Amino acid sequence: EQEDEEEVWTWDVENCGPTVQVQGLGMTAVLKEDEERNAAPVVWETRDDDADEWMPMPPDVQEEVERKFRKGDLYNGSNFTIKKGAGSRPLYLWFEEGELNIRQNVIEGLNF
């Protein structure tokens, strides 16, 4: 007869990649933050359909877009507003359903 017992197991620190941190005596595995991995900051850029050159978004917009991307909120709805620094107008981003095309590191169809 088999009893209903919870199995205890832990994450193996020696078999984790460099971006994983094991905590809680091996009971929890979490991704390290970018600062801990010494990763280069992400740069979000934009360009018009007919332009060849990519231009970086303003730093405060980049931070908010990256935050939404990491939380999984960037594609959660069809629009969102980014509040910029004091005295600046908020930035409104949107996309039409079915028009968003993501390939490698390029997102097409995101408008602002």
Image (cartoon, rainbow, N blue to C red):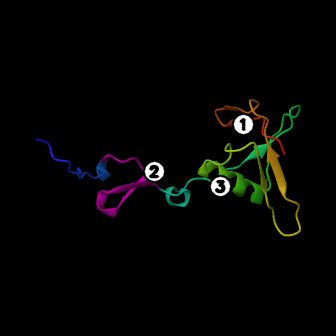
- Look at the image and give the residue range highlighted in magenta: 15-31
Label 1, residues with CA under 10 Å away: few <14, some 14-19, many ≥20: few
Identify the residue at the far left of this view.
Answer: 1
19 part of magenta stretch: yes
Q: Which of the two discs, 3 and 1, labels the residue nearer the N terminus?
A: 3
Q: Nearer the viewer, mark 2 or mark 1?
A: 1
The residue at which mark 2 appears reads as 19
Q: Is residue 18 above or below residue 104?
A: below
Total of numbered circles in the picture? 3
Q: Is residue 36 left or right of residue 87?
A: left
Of 8 and 112, nearer the camera is: 8
Which residue is at a point 79% across and 35% down the rendered structure image? 96
Q: Position of residue 27 (x, y in %)?
A: 32, 57
Q: Which mark is residue 35?
A: none
The residue at which mark 3 appears reads as 67
Give SS at disc 2.
loop
Identify the residue at the far front of this view.
Answer: 1
Task: Give amino acid for label 1.
Answer: Ile
Q: Position of residue 19 (x, y in %)?
A: 45, 50
The residue at which mark 1 appears reads as 107
Placement of the C terminus among the 4 image quadrants: top right
